[in-house]
Image: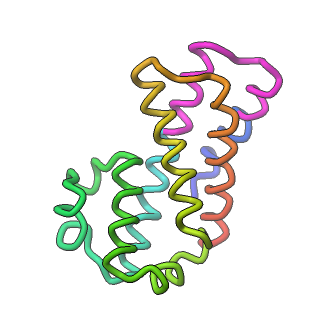
């Protein structure tokens, strides 16, 4: 886990709470955190696929119509995990990701983070959602770091 990302996310949450940042600056801070999270989460997804004896290229890519693994967006990473769950069987899959405990809860959180990031990129974001999304990122990073 990248400790600089964890610190950045925590600092961003505090700066949003204190109203120190807002507007396009808040969008930029959120985007940087989301991009770092996407990169960190990519490593996690690969580890989960390995634990499930699945290969992205052979078992997942065509099902999600995804790019090469290194180009996966956060949304495509979530789709990869969902596809892995289908291929591996939900009960067994859940046992392979103890750090997330309730996969569907985290899939919803990840989708919410991804949707907000997409909205930021398209200049259609609701700034009031940044703090909650960053808090979700912080919680997920904490869970993932416990598993390492």
Q: How many marks?
A: 0
Please give left or right for residue 120 compared with residue 127 in the image. Answer: left
Please give left or right for residue 27 compared with residue 16 in the image. Answer: left
Residue drawn at x 66%, y 38% as measured from the top left: 8
Q: In which quarter of the image is the N terminus?
A: bottom right
User: What segment is highlighted magenta in the picture?
Assistant: 13-34
Residue drawn at x 62%, y 56% as measured from the top left: 140
Query: Is 63 located above or below residue 76 in the figure?
Result: below
Task: Based on the picture, tell me whether residue 139 belongs to the magenta stretch.
Answer: no
Query: Is 106 located above or below residue 71 in the figure?
Result: below
Q: In which quarter of the image is the C terminus?
A: bottom right
- The percent coordinates of residue 112 (x first, y second) are 53, 43
Q: Which residue lies furthest to the right in this view?
A: 18
Query: Is 10 located above or below residue 142 in the figure?
Result: above
Please give left or right for residue 56 compared with residue 46 in the image. Answer: left
- The percent coordinates of residue 15 (x first, y second) are 76, 26
- The percent coordinates of residue 47 (x first, y second) are 42, 71
- The percent coordinates of residue 58 (x first, y second) are 17, 72
Q: Which colour scheme is used?
A: rainbow
Residue drawn at x 74%, y 26% as measured from the top left: 16
Q: Residue furthest top?
A: 23
Q: Residue 106 sits in which quadrant? A: bottom right
Please give left or right for residue 94 compared with residue 49 in the image. Answer: right
Residue drawn at x 60%, y 64% as measured from the top left: 144
Overall secondary structure of the magenta section: helix
Please name whichever residue, 56 or 64, is drawn nearer the observer in this view of the structure: 64
Task: Based on the picture, tell me whether residue 16 belongs to the magenta stretch.
Answer: yes
């Amino acid at each position: 886990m990248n400790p600089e990302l964890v610190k950045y996310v925590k600092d961003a949450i505090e700066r949003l709470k204190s109203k120190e940042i807002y507007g396009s600056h808040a969008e930029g801070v959120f985007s940087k955190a989301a991009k770092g999270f996407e990169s960190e989460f990519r490593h996690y997804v690969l580890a989960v696929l390995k634990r499930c004896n699945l290969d992205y290229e052979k078992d997942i890519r065509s099902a999600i119509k995804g790019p090469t693994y290194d180009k996966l967006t956060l949304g495509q990473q979530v789709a990869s995990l969902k596809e892995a769950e289908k291929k591996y069987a939900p009960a067994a899959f859940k046992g392979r990701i103890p750090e997330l405990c309730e996969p569907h809860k985290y899939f919803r959180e990840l989708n919410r983070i991804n949707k907000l990031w997409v909205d930021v990129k398209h200049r259609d974001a609701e700034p009031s959602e940044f703090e909650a999304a960053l808090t979700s990122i912080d919680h997920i990073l904490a869970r993932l770091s416990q598993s390492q």
